[in-house]
Image (spheres, helix red, strand yellow):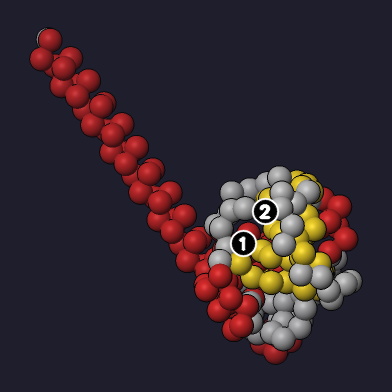
Amino acid sequence: MQWNEQDTQAGDAEAIAALREAERIFAKESARGATAYRVEAGKPAERLEQFDPQAVQIIMVPRVVEG
Amino acid sequence: METLAFMVIGMIVDLSLILCVNFIVKNFLKWSGAKQRAIELLRAVLSVDQHHQLVQLGYVDISGPQDQERIYHVPRGPGLVRVIEKESLTMSLCLKPLEKVPDADIVVMHKLMLEADEETYLQTANRFAPLCAG
């Protein structure tokens, strides 16, 4: 999912819908045990406990187990 | 009557085959798309040097955030993550997602978890003593 932060603040319906969808996926996957990480070029990944609409990129890793 | 029965059975078999092939093709296309997206994500997440190393050597080095002398060798394909400390193999780790995901997504998973949550990674992974040091 992609959205433009400025467009959401300006009330753009498409951007707001994309943001809502991203939030929904975040909540759904978190409930299934996935972990979210904030990823930004040149910086180490950071664990996200809550959805951050301002994050450059959020990657969700499904639940992991020992192999 | 017998001919009609054969025709009906033939139609059912044909329909089943069509549905089966359709299912296989759809899943193949879905999996191919997932693999392609995973490759693109991996390229975006790794630095140029890391991606070059992965292609050339078959693994990528991830430095431990808590101990810079600890290096994790994350393989490109399935396999154990090797832990190197002071140039010696100290242990191997196995951690996998519950869901089936493309190999490139597994590399991303190791990188993100090691960088952002090394402690949980080490607590969750199965540890194996090195078979040979070096």
Q: Are marks 1 and 2 on the same chain?
A: yes
| Host chain of mark 2 | B
Position of the N terminus of chain B by quadrant: top left
The picture places residue A26, in percent across and down from the top left corner, at 73, 62
Residue A20 percent location from the top left of the image:
70, 69
Tell me the SS state at disc 1: strand
Residue B102, given in percent of the width and then of the height, sits at: 55, 57
- For disc 1, the marked residue is B75
Identify the residue at image location x=61%, y=67%: B59
Tell me if mark 1 has few (under 14), some (14-19) or many (20+) residues whose alpha carbon lies within 10 angstroms of its own: many
Residue at image location 28% in from the left, 34% down from the top: B17
Residues tagged 1 and 2 counted as in contact (Cβ below 8 A): yes
Q: Chain of mark 1?
A: B
Q: Is residue B14 visible?
A: yes
Left or right side of B102 for B107: right
Q: Is residue B95 in view? A: no
Give the label on residue B33, or none: none
Q: Amino acid at mark 2?
A: Leu
Which of disc 2 and disc 1 is earlier in sequence?
A: 1
At 77% from the left edge and 78% from the top edge, which residue is drawn? A44
Q: Is residue B78 above or below residue B55?
A: above
- Name the foreground residue: A49 vs B115: B115
Q: Is residue B91 above or below residue B50?
A: above
Q: Nearer the viewer, residue B73 or B46?
A: B73
Q: Which residue in the structure is indicated by mark 2?
A: B80
Which percent across, then down, holds residue B68? 84, 76
